[in-house]
């Protein structure tokens, strides 16, 4: 019996915890002569080995040593940030730690240890940062000003910050608060990716319409449109795409460090 196997990497597949998945038996050629042709998709998906809460810092100066690539998550309060962080790290309780009273206005660091594929032994360490959300209705002017200053300093001065993930509620039409925040990221030349959250809570065509409107609004102020993913923490939608992107950026970061 002869078996021809074609292997492809397809990072766009939404596979949940599988690292090797046979998606389809495409050709079943001449079964009588026992000759099979298989198309095998190998999905290489970052595997999170460990995720732990590290520290909450009141300013960028107090943050842990900037020796690992760092990814910050931010959005309006209640946008689904904790749920998304937990979904990415496969840990239901992780981000709730940073929601504890007193820590909500802090820069919250998590240390993540991952491998690029489940079988790999080479580990990469990186930071995931949960930033305090914007858009609290009941907040004094001085508290808001403090938040703005802390966030601006962190975003502009944290040298190992690789990318900011801005969370947008996919159920709503574009909100000024989100657009204003993104406008600043553009002005400060900070790389960012949009994550549209809670997609499972709304019809797909409404989500698509909201995403389209948001990108159209962004086009008014941004020279280039950012990458964006539609996500759902409940359905684990978007997980592989986000982790894939982080993996790519981690690899680039390691290369850049070697060249320095
Ligand atoms: P945060 O304030 O931005 O950290 O938001 P949370 O993660 O605490 O989420 C706010 C609320 O939205 C909670 O009741 C979550 O259970 C719910 N939620 C968050 N993400 C999703 C999602 O993807 N799908 C659904 N159906 N509910 C979600």
Image: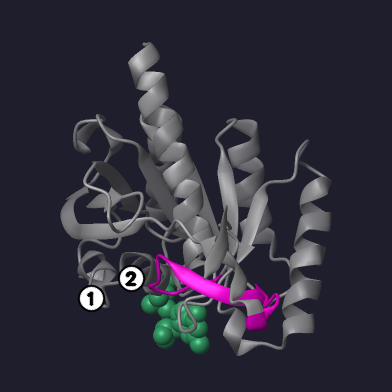
Q: Earlier in the sequence, mark 2 or mark 1?
A: 2
Disc 1 crowd rating (10 Å Cα; few below 14, some 14-19, many 20+) is few
Camera sees residue 131: yes
Residue contact at pointers 2 and 1, CB within 8 angstroms: yes
The answer to which of 107 and 147 lies nearer the viewer is 107
Q: Secondary structure at mark 1?
A: loop
- Mark 2 C-beta closer than 8 Å to ligand 1: yes
Q: Secondary structure at mark 2?
A: helix
Counting from the top left corner in percent of width and height, residue 141 is at: 45, 55
**Residue pictured at 63% horizontal, 48% vertical:** 182
Q: Which quadrant of the frame does ligand 1 lie within?
A: bottom left
Query: Which label is found at residue 86?
Result: 2
Q: Is residue 122 above or below residue 96?
A: above
Residue 12 picture quarter: bottom right
Q: Which residues are magenta?
A: 14-32
Give the position of the C terminus as an image quadrant: top left
Q: Position of residue 15 (x, y in %)?
A: 49, 72
Q: How is the image coloured?
A: one colour
């Amino acid at each position: 019996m002869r078996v021809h196997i074609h292997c492809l990497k397809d990072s766009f597949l939404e596979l949940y915890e599988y690292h090797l998945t046979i998606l389809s038996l495409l050709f079943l050629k001449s079964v009588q002569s026992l000759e099979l042709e298989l198309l095998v998709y190998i999905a290489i998906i970052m595997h999170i080995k460990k995720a732990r809460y590290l520290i909450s810092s009141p300013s960028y100066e107090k943050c842990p040593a900037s020796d690992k690539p760092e990814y910050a998550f931010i959005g309006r309060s209640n946008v689904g940030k904790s749920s998304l962080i937990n979904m990415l790290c496969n840990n239901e309780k992780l981000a709730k730690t940073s929601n504890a009273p007193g820590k909500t206005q802090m820069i919250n660091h998590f240390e993540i240890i991952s491998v690029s594929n489940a079988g790999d032994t080479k580990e990469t360490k990186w930071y995931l940062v949960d930033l305090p959300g914007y858009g609290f209705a009941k907040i004094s002017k001085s508290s808001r000003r403090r938040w703005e200053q802390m966030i601006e300093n962190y975003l502009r001065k944290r040298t190992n910050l690789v990318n900011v993930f801005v969370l947008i509620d996919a159920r709503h039409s574009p909100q000024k608060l989100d657009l204003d925040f993104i406008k600043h990221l553009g002005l400060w030349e900070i790389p960012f990716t949009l994550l549209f959250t809670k997609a499972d809570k709304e019809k797909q065509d409404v989500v698509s319409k909201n995403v389209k409107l948001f990108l159209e609004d962004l086009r008014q102020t941004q020279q280039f449109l950012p990458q964006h993913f539609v996500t759902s923490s409940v359905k684990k939608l978007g997980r592989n795409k986000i982790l894939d992107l982080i993996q790519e950026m981690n690899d680039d970061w390691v290369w850049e460090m070697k060249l320095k």
